[in-house]
Amino acid sequence: MKPESDAIIDIRGLSFARGNRPIFAGVEIKIPRGKVTAIMGPSGTGKTTLLKLIGGQLRPDRGDILLDGLNIPTLGRRELFEVRERMGMLFQSGALFTDMDVFENVAFPLRVHTDLPEEMIRDIVLMKLQAVGLRGARALMPSELSGGMARRVALARAISLDPDIVLYDEPFTGQDPIAMGVLVNLIRRLNQALGHTSIIVSHDIKETLAIADYVYILSDAEVIASGTPKELEGVDSDKVRQFMQGLPDGPVPFHYQAPDYMEDLLGEVS
Amino acid sequence: MISNMLQRIGHRALSRLASLGRSGQLLFQALVARPQPLVMLPLLIKQLWFVGVLSLVIIVVSGGFIGMVLGLQGYTILVDYGSEQAVGQLVALSLARELAPVVTALLFAGRAGSALTAEIGLMKATEQLAGLEMIGVDPLRRIIAPRFWAGFICMPILTMIFTVVGIWGGALVAVDWLGIYDGSFWASMQQAVSFYDDIVNGIIKSICFGLVVTWIAVFQGYDCIPTSEGISQATTRTVVYSSLAVLGLDFVLTALMFGEL
C-alpha cells in the first residue's frame, strides 16, 4: 500500500522551530484515507507538535498542511473552527471538562454543533459510550474516573460527531496492560467500524505497530523512515533499528550532552 | 556588561508590550467577534452566580464594617465642633465617591479575580482549552466572554450594595448607638449628596474598575504558563496588578470627575 494513492492529509515541506531549535525541517508526510497511520519517534521529536499543527493550534514557519486540498495554516479563525469539526482529538491527559459528567462530556460536541433533539443526542451518546464500554459510567464526574477510563471517555467524545479524522496523542502512555489492550483493540475496531482516518502519535512500539497500516518514524526534525510495519523491520538504518528494538544506546544517545563523567565528579562545585 | 543589561531591559520591555498586545486581542475577540446571545445566556448566568452572588457575603460584611468605622470616626471628630449631625453627609459622600468603588474592586480582585485566573489557568494546564478548540468551539467565546461580562456586570451592582450597606452601618453607629438625631443625620445626607456628581460618578468608577479587574483576571489565566508554578504566579499577578490598576485609575478618575469642584 502506498499512501500517495489517496491522501486525506498531505504535509509538504513542513518546517517549524521553537526558538532556535528546529522541530521539523522540510518534513513530508502523507496520511492515507481510512487507514491507521502511526507517527513514531523518541520523546521530544515533536510528535505532539505535529498534531497541533494539523489541528491548526500552531502555525508552521514554512510548508503546507493540506486537508483534502484545504491548506490549514492559511485558514482564518472561523474556517479553522469549521475544519476542526471534521477532526476528533484524543489528548494525552483526556482533557475532559471537569465541570460536566461523563454523559455531558460526550454530548458536548453534539450540543454545540448540531440541532438534534434530546432523545437522539441521548441515543448517540449511549452508543458511543457503549463502544468504549462505559455506558454504565455515564453519571460519573471526570474526577471519579481512573486514567484509563478517562481516556476512553475522551475517545467517545472525540468520535461523537463521527469525524473524518481522529488524532490520538500518545493514547497508550501511562496505561496498565489491560487498559492498553482494550485501547489498542478499540482504536482498531473503531477505525474499521466508522471508516475514519486515524493518526496515532506514540512511542509505544509494540502496541502501535500492531494496529498501524502505515508508519512514519521521526527523528532530528526529519522523517527517517516510513512504510508498513513489515517494511520497517527490514530497514537498514541504525537509528531505525535502535528505536524499533528499544536499544538504550546507538545513534540516539542515552545521555544528554555532558562533560566527561570522571572530570565532572572530580571537578569543583561551581 | 552594560550591553547585557540593556538587552535584558529591552527583552523585558518587549515581552511586556507583547503581552499587552495579546491582552488587547483577547478582549477584542472575546467581546466583539460574533456574539451568540442564546448560547451565552446560560453560561453568563452561571458566571454571574459564581462571580457576583458568591461575592456578596464579603461585600456586605466589609461594607457594613467600613460604614460603622466611618460613622464612629466621623462622630469623634465632628462632635468637637458641635456638628455631629454632618456624619450622615460624611459617611454617604466618602462611600459613594471613593470607598465603595475602590474597596469593592479590591475585594472583588481578591475574591473573584483570583478565582477566575486560577480556574482558567487550570483549564489551560489540563488541556481543556485546547480540547475545546479541537472540538471546534472557540474558548474565547465559550470560556472567556461569559466570565468577562459577568465581572463587568457584577462590579457596579456590588458597589451599590456596598454603598447601601455601608450607609446603613454608619447609621447604626451614629444614630442608634451614639444618639445623633436621625432626622438631621438623614437630612444632611440628602442635602449634600448629588445624584449626578456623586452617585453616578461612583458607578462610572465601578464600571471602569469592573472592566479592568476582570480583564486582568481572565487574561492572566488565559496567558499563564500551564504549570502549577505558572498558575500560582498568574493568580498573584492578578491580585497585584488589579489592585494597583484600581488605585491608580481611581486617582485619575477622581481628578477628572471632581478636579474642578
Image (tube, coloured by chain):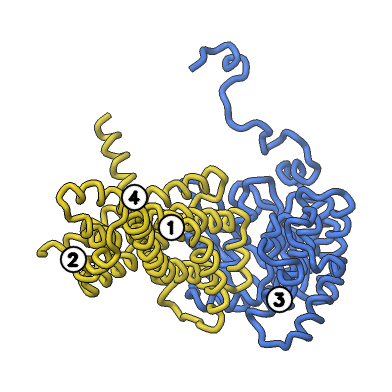
Chain colours: A blue, B yellow
Label 4 element class: helix
Q: State how far apart marks 4 and 1 are (Cα).
A: 21 Å
In this rendering, the label closer to the viewer, 2 or 4? 4
Asked whether residue B211 appears in the rendered view, the answer is: no
Q: State how far apart marks 1 and 3 are (Cα).
A: 43 Å
- Residue holding disc 4: B69
Dot 4 amino acid type: Val
Label 3 element class: loop
- Residue holding disc 2: B257
Number of the label disc, if any, that sits on residue A206: none
Q: What is the quadrant of residue B214 in the picture? A: bottom left
Q: Position of residue A195 (x, y in %)?
A: 79, 76
Disc 4, disc 3: CB below 8 Å?
no
Q: Residue at x 75, y 34 (%)?
A: A248
Dot 1 amino acid type: Phe
- Residue holding disc 1: B108
Q: Position of residue B213 (x, y in %)?
A: 39, 59
Q: Position of residue A7 (x, y in %)?
A: 68, 73
